[in-house]
């Protein structure tokens, strides 16, 4: 029997650094194990700094039994515009479909990726799934230029998945009909050992209680509140604020200014952009993992910290607030509440026993409720539903 052939579209895929890319990699392999012939189309919608004038191209190669197609639109001007990029990506994706005849498309991220994927799927009569990841419905939906396309994409998806129940509620506010063709389930994480990771190069700078956070630091991460909380805590105990990652490029000047203005700037360690293995190596050195997001999806960094048995302080937003249970597997605070964040961090800093207890429960949570087998079963259910409905329609039309 021929395997159903699917095409996942995404803005990043390893070795690209990013949470969405890691999730697509994990899910692509889950679908391959279920029995799908998996293709991943990777593209960027905007010109990057290191790009030069060039022709369009599609570089395809098999990577761990998954076909990865990197689509690069032509750059014919030093001042390209987004619609030129997207129209060329659409053409390259259309050519891929003519070559492989996909049975289903799956877009990750509703704006840009989801729109052109859904437009092509609808044009060629192939079902399409779109996955809401977080910033698409939390931030990009407020763009007047993107709002209409995003709503159209949701309306014309055969199924929509969300990484939190909160995101599903927002999607259903925009398109009420999604109540009947959407689902919400969390990311998962593969168990891993933290015993054989290399010693982090900046380990010698970590003094006192180490409060750490991991990610690409930008507006949604609530970093201002973490800086203020740590500055207040530093009046009572020795600490290091460890930021594993780097600032979003367009916000870099702002965050560098905030760090420089902080009274604890000499106690802040920023690693810069590093790969996942290097980031994981820092987790055993963190006493308290802080994720004070103002909004988020289902961040992989949170799951990794829980798997490492770190005591977590997180906000009750999106999947963070759904996964974490206050005083059971973490301390949970409202977003944007600096006093509550400071108090929670202080409680954990003063109680190694509470840190150990919450860390153990956090690890137990991810090992059971966020195990790969749980997420894989959810994806199997979604794909079975969408493909079976599509097949029924074809049979009905041919009868």
Image: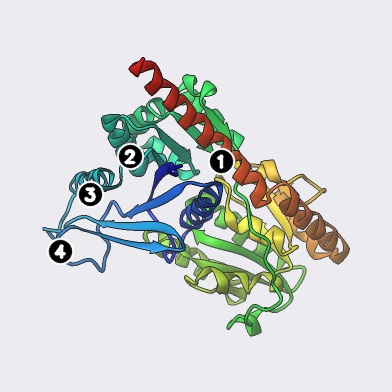
Going from N to C along the chain, the mark reached first, 1 or 4, is 4
Q: Residue at coordinates 53% horizontally, 34% vertically from top-left?
A: 384
Viewer-nearest residue: 287 or 193: 193
Q: Residue furthest front?
A: 1
Going from N to C along the chain, the mark reached first, 4 or 2, is 4
Q: Which residue is mark 3?
A: 92
**What's the mark number on residue 379?**
1
Left or right placement of residue 371 versus residue 70 in this view: right
**What's the mark number on residue 117?**
2
> Mark 3 falls on what kind of element?
helix
Mark 1–mark 3 CB contact (< 8 Å): no
**Disc 4 and disc 3: Cα gap in Å?**
15 Å
**Disc 3 and disc 2: Cα gap in Å?**
11 Å
Determine the image quadrant of residue 211: bottom right
Residue 200, position as x, y percentages in the image: 61, 80
Viewer-nearest residue: 366 or 272: 366
**Disc 1 and disc 2: Cα gap in Å?**
19 Å
Going from N to C along the chain, the mark reached first, 1 or 2, is 2
Vertical arrangement, residue 9 with respect to residue 359, above or below: above
Q: Which residue is mark 4?
A: 54
Residue 378, position as x, y percentages in the image: 60, 39
**What's the mark number on residue 357?**
none
């Amino acid at each position: 029997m021929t395997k159903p052939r699917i095409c996942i579209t995404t803005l990043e895929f390893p070795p690209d650094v990013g949470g969405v890319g890691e999730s697509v990699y994990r899910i692509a392999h889950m679908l391959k194990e279920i029995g799908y012939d998996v293709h991943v189309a990777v593209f960027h919608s905007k010109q990057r700094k290191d790009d030069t004038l060039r022709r369009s191209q599609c570089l395809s190669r098999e990577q761990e039994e998954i076909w990865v197609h990197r689509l690069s639109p032509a750059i014919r001007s030093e001042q390209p515009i987004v619609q030129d990029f997207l129209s060329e990506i659409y053409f390259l994706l259309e050519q891929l479909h003519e070559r492989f005849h996909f049975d289903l498309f799956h877009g990750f991220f509703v704006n840009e990726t989801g729109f052109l994927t859904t437009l092509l799927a609808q044009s060629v009569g192939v079902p399409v799934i779109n996955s809401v990841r977080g910033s698409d419905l939390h931030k990009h939906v407020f763009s007047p230029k993107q709002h209409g396309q995003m709503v159209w994409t949701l309306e014309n998806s055969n199924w929509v998945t969300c990484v939190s129940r909160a995101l599903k509620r927002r999607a259903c506010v925009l398109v009420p009909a999604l109540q009947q063709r959407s689902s919400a389930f969390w990311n998962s994480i593969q168990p891993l050992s933290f015993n054989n990771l290399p010693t982090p190069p900046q380990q010698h700078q970590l003094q006192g209680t180490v409060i750490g956070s991991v990610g690409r630091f930008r507006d949604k991460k609530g970093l201002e509140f973490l800086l203020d909380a740590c500055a207040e805590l530093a009046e009572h105990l020795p600490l290091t604020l460890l930021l594993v990652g780097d600032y979003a490029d367009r916000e870099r000047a702002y965050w560098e200014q905030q760090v420089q203005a902080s009274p604890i700037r000499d106690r802040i360690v920023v690693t810069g952009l590093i790969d996942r293995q290097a980031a994981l190596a820092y987790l055993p050195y963190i006493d308290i993992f802080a994720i004070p997001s103002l909004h988020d999806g289902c961040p992989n960094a949170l799951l990794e910290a829980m798997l490492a048995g770190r005591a977590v302080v997180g906000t009750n937003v999106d999947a963070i607030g759904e996964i974490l249970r206050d005083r059971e597997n973490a301390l949970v605070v409202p977003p944007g509440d600096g006093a509550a964040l400071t108090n929670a961090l202080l409680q954990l800093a003063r109680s190694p026993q509470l840190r150990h207890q919450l860390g153990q429960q956090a690890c137990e949570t991810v090992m059971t409720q966020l195990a790969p087998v749980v997420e894989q079963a959810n994806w199997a259910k979604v794909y079975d539903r969408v493909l079976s409905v599509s097949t029924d329609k074809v049979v009905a039309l041919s009868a």
